[in-house]
């Protein structure tokens, strides 16, 4: 099953205002009466591996459960804004090291158990645990201790200031500490409860009529899972599903170009990345990495994959991030310059390397394109196709690779270039310090300035090759409205989706 790679991210400090369910950017639609007891069928190619966000559940578990079954102290809206959810109040000490959160009143889990501060502490600690597979784990490294002076209060003390704390907490699901089997069962505070999970087929969510906040606008949501995009598109054409979370090819759109369907092109944070292992030769040489970047015609690649959709990017930072700067001109396509850089690196005749690529689209197609491009400047690339599970072990965990392809879903994830131990092994002391200093900034302006400076260095040194930014194309029946349009970290809030009666 296809799984994009979700990573922890850095956030901007956001003003904290009391809010209910996260606001959702919605599709346009008419004013006809809607059915409050409708079942919304959603098409997706991202089935969860399991139902636990600390056990490698993949993109699918976040898409189905985040904000729908499970909630956090804070939520991230479809527009990327951090808003309080289970946190009723927030107080920060003058030195920025102690956060005191008061919990919402009257919140219960789907099981009927009341939400307590102990559940919040348990949920944060399980993400921080040594055996946690959560990609969010490292974002909580600044936490020194968590205390629960009473059932309605959580006190988090930090080792160092963390301007991103509330953003990072928006990814931490609050789970009932009495839940015994989070891999196959759920117990959250969200607007839905888990219905039936038919592995390899579907996962249903049922409206939680005891929900503490605004109830879902539909009675049931069913995520229908497909192994290929054609079958998913056909399901929409035949009415088997009402909405597709992300169309995989522009070639599919012509069949939806009529009044029966709505096609939306939202903002994406998913980057297609050629990641080098910067620890090993020849990719430990900046000039080699710059040469590879200059040898690749990213515009031609994007057009071949997505036609007129998608965006060229020159760094890990998409336009939706506050520290975005257009760096597409850095190490831009220039085969002659690529050859010159290789000569300067002592490789006038080029070199050979192996690319480990996941076996699902578009990676194999992208790999073939890269092989052809690099051959023009004397670089020989061997393609080794591996499964998503093999990628996680071989590349992410063991760092046993020369170069790889991967989708990086999250916004604000440039910070991983400040961690030399991350799988791509980029190590620049100035960048590491800038990113660390950005996290302890007093203001968002200071944070933004430091991350812009760090990103400029990362791009200039071609730490990776950022091939393109995916489009986020959501297609639905014209009878269905209220779904998210933007591809923010794979979440797909379903609680505001409506269907005409």
Image (tube, rainbow, N blue to C red):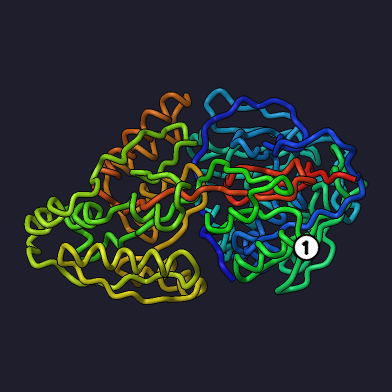
Q: Residues within 10 Å of mark 1 (few under 14, many from 20)?
A: some
Q: Nearer the viewer, residue 370 or 11?
A: 370
Q: Which residue is mark 1?
A: 240
Q: Residue furthest front?
A: 258
User: Seen in the image, is 29 located left or right of residue 291?
Assistant: right
Q: Is residue 250 above or below residue 370?
A: above
Q: Image point 41% across, 25% down: which residue?
A: 446
Q: Image point 54% across, 41% down: which residue?
A: 267
User: Seen in the image, is 480 located left or right of residue 331?
Assistant: right
Q: Is residue 370 above or below residue 109?
A: below
- Answer with the quarter of the image where residue 88 lies: top right
- Residue 338 seen anywhere in this rendered image of the structure: yes
Q: Nearer the viewer, residue 226 or 354?
A: 226
Identify the element where label 1 is drawn: loop
Query: Looking at the picture, how far across and down is residue 481, in whole percent?
Result: 76, 42
Q: Image point 7% across, 63% down: which residue?
A: 348
Query: Looking at the picture, how far across and down is residue 147, in whole percent?
Result: 68, 42
Q: Image point 7% across, 58% down: which residue?
A: 343
Q: Is residue 235 above or below residue 287?
A: below
Q: Nearer the viewer, residue 259 or 479?
A: 259
Quadrant (top left, top right, bottom left, bottom right) of the N terminus: bottom right
User: Seen in the image, is 326 located left or right of residue 207?
Assistant: left
């Amino acid at each position: 099953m296809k799984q994009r790679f979700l990573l922890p991210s850095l956030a901007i400090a956001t003003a904290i205002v009391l809010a209910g369910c996260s606001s959702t950017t919605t599709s346009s639609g008419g004013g006809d009466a809607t059915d409050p007891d409708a079942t919304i069928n959603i098409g997706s190619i991202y089935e969860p591996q399991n139902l636990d966000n600390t056990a490698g559940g993949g993109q699918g578990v976040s898409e189905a459960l985040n904000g729908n079954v499970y909630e956090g102290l804070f939520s991230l809206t479809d527009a990327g804004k951090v808003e309080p959810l289970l946190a009723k109040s927030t107080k920060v000490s003058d030195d920025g090291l102690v956060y005191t959160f008061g919990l919402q009143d009257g919140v219960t889990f789907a099981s009927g158990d009341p939400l307590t501060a102990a559940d919040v502490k348990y949920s944060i600690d399980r993400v921080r645990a040594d055996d946690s597979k959560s990609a969010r784990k490292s974002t909580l490294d600044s936490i020194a201790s968590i205390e629960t002076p009473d059932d309605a209060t959580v006190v988090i003390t930090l080792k160092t200031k963390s301007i991103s704390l509330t953003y990072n907490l928006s990814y931490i699901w609050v789970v009932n500490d009495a839940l015994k089997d989070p891999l196959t069962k759920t117990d959250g505070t969200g607007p839905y409860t888990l219905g039936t999970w038919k592995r390899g087929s579907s996962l249903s969510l049922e409206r939680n009529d005891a929900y503490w906040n605004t109830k879902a606008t539909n009675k049931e949501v069913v995520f229908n899972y497909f192994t290929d995009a054609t079958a998913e598109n056909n399901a929409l054409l035949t009415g088997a599903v009402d909405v597709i979370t992300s169309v995989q090819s522009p070639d599919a759109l012509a069949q939806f170009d009529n009044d029966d369907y709505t096609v939306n092109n939202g903002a994406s944070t998913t980057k297609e990345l050629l990641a080098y292992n910067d620890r090993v030769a020849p990719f430990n040489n900046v000039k080699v990495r710059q040469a590879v970047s200059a040898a690749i015609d990213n515009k031609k690649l994007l057009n071949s994959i997505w036609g007129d959709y998608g965006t060229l990017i020159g760094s890990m930072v998409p336009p939706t991030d506050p520290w975005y700067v257009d760096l597409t001109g850095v190490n831009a396509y220039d085969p002659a310059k690529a050859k010159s850089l290789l000569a300067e690196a002592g490789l006038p005749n080029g070199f050979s390397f192996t690319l480990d690529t996941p076996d699902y689209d578009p990676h194999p197609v992208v790999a073939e394109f890269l092989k052809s491009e690099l051959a023009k400047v004397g670089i020989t690339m061997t393609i080794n196709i591996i499964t998503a599970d093999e990628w996680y072990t071989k590349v992410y965990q063991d760092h046993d690779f020369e170069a790889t392809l991967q989708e990086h879903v999250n916004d604000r994830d440039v910070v991983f270039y400040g961690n030399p131990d991350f799988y791509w092994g980029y190590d620049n002391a100035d960048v590491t310090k800038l990113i660390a200093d950005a996290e302890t900034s007093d203001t968002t302006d200071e944070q933004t300035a430091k991350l812009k400076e760090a990103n400029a260095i990362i791009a200039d040194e071609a730490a990776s090759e950022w091939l393109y930014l995916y489009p986020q194309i959501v297609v639905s029946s014209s009878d269905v409205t209220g779904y998210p349009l933007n591809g923010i970290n794979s979440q797909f809030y379903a609680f505001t989706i409506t269907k005409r009666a």
